[in-house]
Image (tube, rainbow, N blue to C red):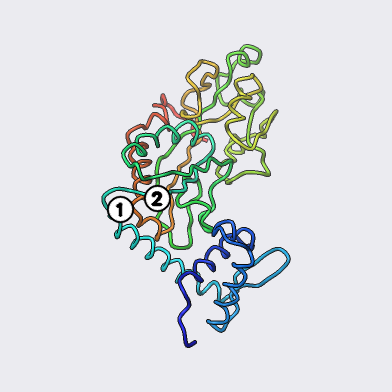
Amino acid sequence: MNILPEWTDLRFFLELARAGTLSGASRRLEVEHTTVARRIDRLEAQLGTTLFDRSREGYELTEMGQTLLPHAEAMEGAALAAAEQLVGAEVTAHGVVRLGVPELFGVRVVASLLASLLRDHPDLSIDLLVLPRFANLANREADMGVMLDPPTTGRYVVTRMATFRMYLYASPEYLARHKPIHSHADLVHHDFVDYVQDRLASQELSYLNELGFTPRRRLCCTGMTAQVEAAKAGLGLMLAPPYAIPDDGRLKMVLPGFYAERSYWLAAPTDLYRLQRVRAVWNLLREHADSHPELFMHEAPEPSMQL
């Protein structure tokens, strides 16, 4: 190889690797798909190797493409960090941060929380991805994410944001129409609202399977927002963290002290975590979780009955 590849060609390589299709990469880069194809052809010619396997389904990295990927990501991170330092971004965060969060957590907690951060950083913008699943950091769908399953491979910074507890709730109307609940054994006679089991965003959401019996699921939803509304309508019991329950009296806790425990994790690619704008959002979420434990768990009376 007589000439080094241009950084812009490596950007095209990265976006195609993340999107998997020419059309997806072209949207990210705001160019025509033919431009993406031409840049990839040029890069492969310069490197003297094939970086992608082409098929009708899209573009998939070859072994050599996988080898190039972390080096291109490191160059991207260095370029972003350099740009921040040149404009003095070590003092104030600027630019756009794409934050992926679980649906109801994003609506009830994160959206309003971001207001103070944006007031303090007038040049910062947030793309809040409120999802019924967890953001895919590997293809850079988001710059950082809140998730139940942190990445275990690859170059990521990961930290536990909060441990939370899922308590049993039901509407007063449902409780008035059904048998009293005094103990765990009474639950077998009741209806439940849950996630659609073959559409779970994480196996960590299969907490009802830990009850010790097969629950009678009357309504299953792909997101917790719909589950809360269904439970308020009297369709059954549901498990939810405190932040998910509106303070309007339409849902009451059942069997205080009975809960399923999980953890939320913050994760970001290492190169993006170095950016001031990403760390500003990261620190905000960490500090808010630390200072508001009531969002994630109640003080359970003894003895507690963990699933």
Crowd class of label 2 (few under 14; some 14 to 19; many from 20; radius 10 Å)? some
Q: Which percent across, then down, holds residue 207? A: 57, 38
- Compared to residue 31, the image places residue 50 above or below, namely below
- Amino acid type indicated by mark 1: Ala
- Compared to residue 65, the image places residue 146 above or below, namely above
Q: Residue at x 63, y 36 (%)?
A: 195
Q: Secondary structure at mark 2?
A: strand
Name the residue nearer the viewer: 107 or 192.
107
The residue under label 2 is 95
- Amino acid type indicated by mark 2: Gly
Specify whether 116 is left or right of 165.
left
Q: Which percent across, then down, holds residue 241? A: 49, 31
Name the residue nearer the viewer: 75 or 293.
75
Q: CA distance from mark 1 to mark 2?
A: 9 Å
Image quadrant where residue 113 sits: top left
Q: Residue at x 39, y 34 (%)?
A: 115
Mark 1–mark 2 contact, CB under 8 Å?
Answer: yes
Specify whether 28 is left or right of 55.
left
- Compared to residue 247, the image places residue 74 above or below, namely below
Crowd class of label 1 (few under 14; some 14 to 19; many from 20; radius 10 Å)? some
Specify whether 58 is left or right of 159.
right
Name the residue nearer the viewer: 13 or 272.
13
Name the residue nearer the viewer: 104 or 202.
104
The residue under label 1 is 89
Which residue is the extreme one toward the right?
Answer: 56
Q: Residue at x 63, y 33 (%)?
A: 194
Task: Using the image, tell me which numbered label, if any, was put on residue 20.
Answer: none
Q: Secondary structure at mark 1?
A: loop
State which tag comes first along the sequence, 1 or 2.
1
